[in-house]
């Protein structure tokens, strides 16, 4: 999906919501466990219930890889079921030497049909650039994350700047605003003005709203640009809104509430 297509979807739906399909088989409603593929059945119903209110889905591959071959098959079926109108993110956090990253890029962009892959930049340019060679596909590079461990490295000073600032400035030169986004955690709202000043035109994938308690209003007011520039992810708050047979209806209600609030900020 190109940048212009993504922007069109955002303003057409008045939403910049990304639904995280971080599906844990131990947390899905018990009545689904008798299905041939319980996780896929859960994901399918969540997608059907929320697709009118979001523009993107993010699949955290760890939840599928943990189930072995069957989990990977579920991931494939889920990716194929997501409508082509939606921006599909493989939250795989890959990043290795160039020839290995090339194979990771083939896995997610050729064997599968994701629009974007999350990538760790620690190993440098050759670990990221293979993901930038596909037209209409994106690398979403970890910039400033929402976890407590962000303090361990991302907020360490390098002369007169934090490491995360160095990452944003350096990585933004490897691609363009047409193929490169950054993960910026919503819990880092105190840093968003600085982040936006360093990367004024890039899109951000923003986790941390919902179960982690960050404010959608605060993030939208601080970080939005003229093209919106945000994909705000909510996972647990939506997909686990209920553990009963009404789980899809409750997920739809939460997703709709996010969409209605987002429409007031666009």
Image: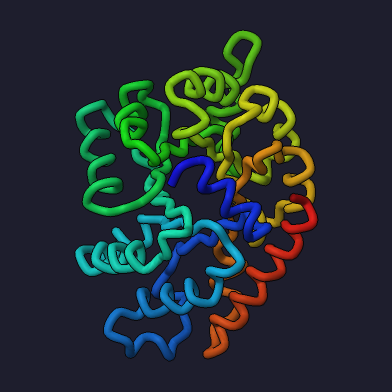
Q: Nearer the viewer, residue 60 or 52?
A: 52
Rendered position, 24 above or below 84? below
In the figure, residue 44 lies in which quadrant?
A: bottom left
Whether residue 67 is visible here, answered yes or no, is: yes
Identified at 59% across, 81% down, the residue is: 242
In the visual, does 159 lie left or right of 61?
right
Q: How many marks?
A: 0
Identified at 28% across, 40% down, the residue is: 105
Whether residue 148 is visible here, answered yes or no, is: no
In the visual, does 181 lie left or right of 122?
right
* Extreme residue toward the top, this view: 159
Rendered position, 60 above or below 40? above
In the visual, does 149 lie left or right of 109?
right
Q: In the image, residue 26 lies at what x, y percent?
A: 42, 75
Q: In the image, residue 264 lies at what x, y percent?
A: 79, 56
Q: In the image, residue 110 lies at what x, y percent?
A: 24, 47
Q: Nearer the viewer, residue 6 or 16?
A: 6
Identified at 43% across, 67% down, the residue is: 23
Rendered position, 238 above or below 101? below
Q: How is the image coloured?
A: rainbow
In the figure, residue 116 lies in which quadrant?
A: top left
Q: In the image, residue 48 lies at what x, y percent?
A: 49, 76
Identified at 74% across, 58% down, the residue is: 263
């Amino acid at each position: 999906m190109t940048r212009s297509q993504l922007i069109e979807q955002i303003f057409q739906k008045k939403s910049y919501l990304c639904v995280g399909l971080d599906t844990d088989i131990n947390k899905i409603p018990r009545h689904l466990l008798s299905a041939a593929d319980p996780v896929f059945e859960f994901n399918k119903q969540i997608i059907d219930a929320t697709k009118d209110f979001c523009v993107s889905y993010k699949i955290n591959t760890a939840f599928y890889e943990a189930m072995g071959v069957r989990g990977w098959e579920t991931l494939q079926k889920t990716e194929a079921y997501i409508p082509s109108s939606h921006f599909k993110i493989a939250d795989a956090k890959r990043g290795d030497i160039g020839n290995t990253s090339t194979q990771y890029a083939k896995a997610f962009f050729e064997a599968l049909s994701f629009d974007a892959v999350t990538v760790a930049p620690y190993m440098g340019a050759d670990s990221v650039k293979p993901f930038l060679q596909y037209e209409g596909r994106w690398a979403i590079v970890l910039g400033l994350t929402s976890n407590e461990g962000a303090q361990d490295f991302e907020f360490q000073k390098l002369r007169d700047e934090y490491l995360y600032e160095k990452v944003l400035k350096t990585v933004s030169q490897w691609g363009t605003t047409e193929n490169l986004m950054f993960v910026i955690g919503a819990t880092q709202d105190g840093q968003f003005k600085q982040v936006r000043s360093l990367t004024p035109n890039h899109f951000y994938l923003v986790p941390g709203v919902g179960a982690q308690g960050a404010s959608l209003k605060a993030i939208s007011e601080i970080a939005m640009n003229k093209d919106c520039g945000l994909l705000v992810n909510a996972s647990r708050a939506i997909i686990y809104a209920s553990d009963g047979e009404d789980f899809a209806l409750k997920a739809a209600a939460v997703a709709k509430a996010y969409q209605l609030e987002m429409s007031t900020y666009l």
